[in-house]
Image (cartoon, grey):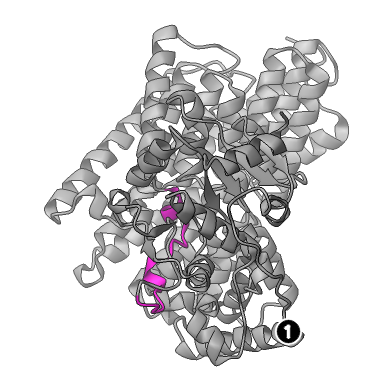
Amino acid sequence: MDDLEFTIDKLRSGEIFFFAGSGISYASNLPSAYVILKHTVNAFLPASIPMKEKENICSRIQPEVFYESVIGMTQTYESLHIWQSLHKGMQNRHHIRCEPSLSHLFIAEYSINNHLPIITTNFDSMFEQACELLGINYKLLLPTDDPYTIDSNSLCICKIHGSIQDNQDMYSPQSLWTTMTQITTVNTKWIEYICNVMNNKHLCFVGYSGRDIDLFPYLSEAPNKIGAKRIVWVNRFDGDHSDNASKACNAIRVHKWPSELFESSLDLVDVSKHPKKYTASNQDSNLKKLLDHLENELVKMDLLSDPEKELLYCVLLAKIGNYRKAHKYAIDIEKNKLSNLTRHLNKYLLLLTCARLSHEISRYESCRAYAFKVLQILSDRSKYDVNVELQARCLLSEALRMGIPNDIYFIQPKRLGDYMYVFYVAGYFNYVAVINNIKMRLHGLKYIELRPETQHELIEHRIRYYALIQSAIGSPQRGWNRYAKQFLIRRWDDIKEMSHRVGYSAGIANAGKFKYRLIPSEKTRNESANIYNLTTSATGSELIVRNEADQLLRDKEFDKCRIKFIEYSDMAKKSGNVLNEIKGFIGYAYSNYMEGNLPLLPEPLKNRYNRLVNLVEARRWKEHFMYIDRAVLNSTRNT
């Protein structure tokens, strides 16, 4: 029995329940998430930004990354105004017909016949409308609802990322999970519920990409971890993300579009036949008018001032990994328009962004200076914000840590002062952790009550601390002490679990990145790489490639290793991360050193390397570059 026959057989016996993604709504004349994002970006970015640049941001950024930035700056769900185009009432007012597809109708009727829930991440109301057309009594459940209220008397539509309308058909943007924090936070009760159903039924993904960090990793492991039934996945598998995800979870793969499977199953499964619907020719025109109307309304709300729109543009450039351009833009705003930012929260965001971008392009002294500037402003009690202070203190620690020449291939003989400085930085990290805890206690705040960005920064502070410890006690080249290795693996697992709890996607990926250096694993590498790709983290993606180069170096595959180090450098050049670009060249030279090749760096790479070392703001790094230049690169033999 092949996969298609198996799936149809399980449909006949009612042994499949459905998890639907946005792909099944394409035929319903609904605007896509990309189209809604495009109109929202156009409303919020400065009018001076060329349309081509706005489209570039839309095509590269994950929508949840964008909406997290916008909601953070506006502090209101009104910024989701254009999502109202999915609401049936709004569509009716603009004479737009968006109707359930065959997939919606089939899944709804099949599910009620077999007393099964529908699980979906879709915001739209197509399943509800399908139930109304079919005369099915249904119940809508949202992410915060208790799944164990599900009963067999009605069809339960479980919208685990929220719904555009509530049970009274009212527009409800506050229920939409549109930020990375929301779609990363583990929703334990829903995962447990779905896994329980998987014990007896096959979970079937339709129109789903498998990119959700809060759900898919746990559901995909259920067949192996808890002995649940195998997953079924319906898709054409044209090399998209679901292609790889379906293979990773060993799914039963049905190479058809969901509508094709359902149409061919109508005579085999106890489900009604439904006539095909044809969209009126003017529907696209009416939909565009609605989107333009909502965009104009959003502009008139004036949720961000012009300088704040420029700051948002700067933040988005950083989010898509264009650190050099974002840094230049941020510095210009800070020098010329800081006083024009009327909201204190966005003034602090600008200064913290300047600090973080200085860090990304290897200007660590500037990073520290901007963090200090934030603390100086906060000394005025009328402008005080404990969340901002906690973030700024963490950045002070990071600026110190990045001044230590770590994760390098040519080891410079250590002086007493070097050991003392590492000890000082580690102590400073602990000092900041203590001070931050005291500040939280003084303000009566628990960790979970902090703003998401502060929670994330505190986790990142912990990651940086253990990264410092890890680099001090070993490296992929020097090896690891067995007990220290076990200790660090436990710490990375703890940090990963904590990051899942609070929705910090970068924390999950970063913990995996450092754990990979201790125990290289394809699963760990792929998980981190997928998150970095999802969140368009340039530095994270660069370090995944660097980890691969390190592994090839350990395996003495020198030709492949050198190719990876150059790929690493080229990626860093594109983003503006100077230190990563330099480390790629040093890794290339070290590969030649290990193989016994001279010169260690070809002349073009050496010239490029020499230009870059002057751009790093960190005294100890400059001293280390001088050592490499003197003792290694200009040597006539391998020493």
At horizontal 37% and vertical 72% (from top left) the residue drawn is 166
Which residue is tagged 1?
280
Report x, y in % for residue 160: 42, 55
Q: Position of residue 101 (x, y in %)?
A: 63, 66
Give the position of the C terminus as an image quadrant.
Answer: top right
Q: Is residue 11 left or right of residue 257?
A: left
Look at the image and give the residue range highlighted in magenta. Answer: 168-184
Q: Quadrant of residue 491?
A: top left
Give 379 or 28, whichever is nearer the viewer: 28
Q: Amino acid at mark 1?
A: Ala
Left or right: 37, with 123 as reference point = right
Side of 600 where 462 appears, left or right: left
Q: Residue at x 56, y 48 (%)?
A: 360
Q: Is residue 505 within the magenta segment?
A: no
Is residue 179 in sight in this rendering?
Answer: yes
Residue at 74 percent of width and 12 percent of height: 556
The answer to whether any part of residue 610 appears in the image is no
